[in-house]
Image: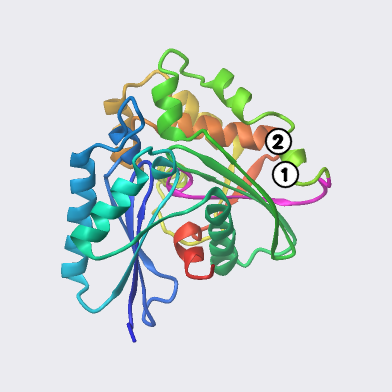
Amino acid sequence: MHKKQILIEFGSNTAKVFSLSKIKPLGKTEVYPLRLADGLDSQDRLASPVMDEMIRLIDNTKTEHPHAKIHLIATQALRSARNQAEIIDRLRDTTGLSLQILSPQDEARAAFMGIMAVSRIQGDMLSFDIGGASTEIIFGKNGKLKQWKSFPIGAVNLTMDSPADPSFESQINRLITKDAIAEIMLSNIGSFRLVGCGGSVNTALSIALAHHSQSYSEDSGHELYLAEITRQIELMRPLSAGEIAAIAGMDPTRADIMLAALCIIRHIMDISHKESFTISGGGVRQGYFLL
């Protein structure tokens, strides 16, 4: 029996290696700058050199963790790839491991279960997870998933598709309508907590803490306020990606897409009529093992 479980998640913006063991039951995540969304060509086929990078990461992980059981998953970027079968076959033939491309439903379920496992939020919860190529919004009631929706808009594809619109408003409003929250919550909008998870949310927290000369931690439960999200948007809007990368607390690998992510966060807060949201350290990686 394997004492350690390793999950490699190939997202649209980064690849993450998540290790789970008895010593670290909540897991440890290492992030690698592998942006699959940029590796799709004009026919939405993933380029061979990008597959080579995926294989190198898998091989390196196998070398570092020779006795672990390794799982491979992917999300929206590979859901949209037209050569999925080629990708799966090549990874299996080269590494001996099978890649599971999560359906939108399984991704939403995993995100919800990961949030609940780590944060244990009570009552009604509306959570959001902004990826590179999609945004999942999930409604849970008393610890049970009730409704979810995946929107084909994320920080990477929004940045790539709207270079002339630094506010991104028209694209965001078109894809995540003002009625989206009511539809997801089955028109039963009462008192609920808004919860965010994922890399962009945690980067926004890191920037906020650095602004107040506080140290960043991955603990769940921090609150971010609409005023702070707006401050970060106005700070970044006139800056180049290089200048954004130099902001205290910023993850440099997200510098070119962070403004788009913040605009999505603010839009979700606006249509949810919330002045703040809670940050959860849980998400797809933690929830995958509970599916």
Name which residue lies at 24% across and 51% down: 54
Marks 2 and 1 sit apart, C-alpha to C-alpha, by: 6 Å
Hey, what amino acid is under mark 2?
Ala
Left or right position of 36 against 181: left
Can you see residue 246?
no
Residue density around tag 1, few if under 14, some if 14–19, many if 20 or more, within 10 Å: some
Hey, what amino acid is under mark 1?
Ile
Query: In the rendered structure, which segment of residues is drawn in magenta?
Result: 188-202
Quadrant in the picture for residue 42: top left
**Residue 99 percent across, percent down from the top left:** 35, 58
Quadrant in the picture for residue 161: top left
Q: Could you say which is closer to the camera, residue 187 or residue 76?
A: 76
Left or right position of 227 against 37: right
Q: Residue furthest bottom?
A: 1
- The verdict on residue 263 being magenta is no
Can you see residue 146?
yes
Left or right position of 265 against 47: right
**Residue 180 percent across, percent down from the top left:** 70, 35
Residue density around tag 2, few if under 14, some if 14–19, many if 20 or more, within 10 Å: some
The reply to whether dot 2 and dot 1 touch (C-beta < 8 Å) is yes
Which residue carries the number 1 mark? 184
- Quarter of the picture containing the C terminus is bottom right
Which residue carries the number 2 mark? 180
- The verdict on residue 189 being magenta is yes
Left or right position of 193 against 133: right
* Residue 240 vertical placement versus 35 (above, below): above
Q: Could you say which is closer to the camera, residue 110 or residue 121?
A: 110
